[in-house]
Image (cartoon, helix red, strand yellow):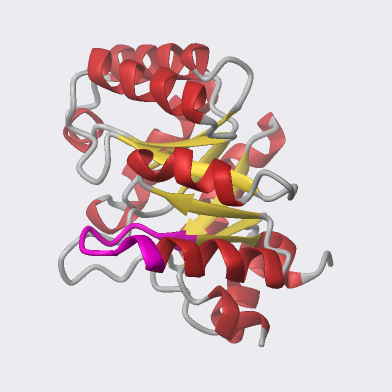
């Protein structure tokens, strides 16, 4: 297994975070040689400034946290984020469309966002806390057809949500792996034991704000 730090996208998405919190995040990412940082789009330029002499990936979120923006808005956000220096895009799926089984809409939106990524990785956040097992599998199948690079469990913003569950990660992995997609587990990963469970279940990326504790 690759070193645990190389699974971690060190994450700060809190709406009340201050500039010094982000600078601390970037420094911790460098000190621990994390794979990436995950931040909201308006901080991508700041991340680019502080991480310019490193190979740490800058990951940002689109349609966050509800996924209910119009497709056109998500496309604009994506193009803007890539222009500002984002290396990867984590886009929230439209959960209502998943519930309604609006397959054509879901696939087309993913295709359009992937095109806007310009060759950069696209991860699609399914928000597994809100989905049944059948809906998780269905959403994964739409992501395959839409050309996504990853499926991701959670935003971490669902009230009373659990976040990533190993059983969901395993289901996602079994659905997408043979098609070349990877799985990012995110939400509620706060210790090394949980992180290792997610990797064992099939995750190749971990989104967590507890990265320093996990590798410590």
Q: Quadrant of residue 158?
A: bottom left
The residue nearer to you, when weighing 174 against 180, is 180
- Counting from the top left corner in percent of width and height, residue 9 is at 57, 58
**Left or right: 66 in relation to 28:** left
Q: Is residue 207 visible?
A: no
Q: Is residue 76 magenta?
A: no
Q: Which residues are magenta?
A: 11-20
Q: Is residue 18 visible?
A: yes
Residue shown at 40%/21% (left/top)? Answer: 80
Number of marks in the rendered image = 0
**In the image, residue 15 above or below residue 119:** below
Residue shown at 23%/53% (left/top)? Answer: 130
- Counting from the top left corner in percent of width and height, residue 63 is at 27, 34
Residue shown at 68%/63% (left/top)? Answer: 34
What is the magenta segment's predominant secondary structure? loop
- Counting from the top left corner in percent of width and height, residue 204 is at 67, 54
* Farthest-out residue, right: 1
- Counting from the top left corner in percent of width and height, residue 185 is at 51, 59
Q: Quadrant of residue 150?
A: top right
The residue nearer to you, when weighing 100 against 196, is 196
């Amino acid at each position: 297994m690759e070193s645990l730090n190389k699974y971690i996208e060190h994450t700060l998405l809190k709406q009340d975070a201050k500039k010094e919190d982000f600078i601390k995040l970037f420094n911790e990412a460098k000190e621990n040689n994390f794979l990436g940082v995950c931040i909201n789009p308006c901080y991508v330029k700041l991340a680019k400034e502080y991480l310019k002499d490193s190979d740490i990936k800058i990951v940002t979120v689109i349609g966050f946290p509800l996924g209910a923006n119009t497709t056109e808005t998500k496309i604009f956000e994506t193009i803007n984020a890539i222009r500002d220096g984002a290396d990867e895009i984590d886009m929230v799926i439209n959960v209502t469309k998943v519930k309604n089984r609006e397959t054509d809409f879901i696939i087309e939106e993913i295709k359009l966002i992937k095109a806007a990524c310009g060759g950069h990785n696209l991860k699609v956040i399914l928000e597994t806390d809100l989905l049944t097992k059948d809906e998780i599998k269905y959403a994964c199948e739409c992501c395959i057809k839409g050309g996504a690079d990853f499926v991701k469990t959670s935003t971490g913003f669902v009230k009373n949500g659990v976040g990533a569950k190993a059983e969901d990660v395993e289901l996602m992995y079994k659905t997408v792996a043979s098609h070349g997609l990877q799985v990012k587990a995110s939400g509620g990963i706060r210790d090394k034991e949980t992180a290792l469970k997610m990797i064992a279940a099939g995750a190749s990326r971990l989104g967590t704000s507890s990265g320093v504790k996990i590798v410590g």
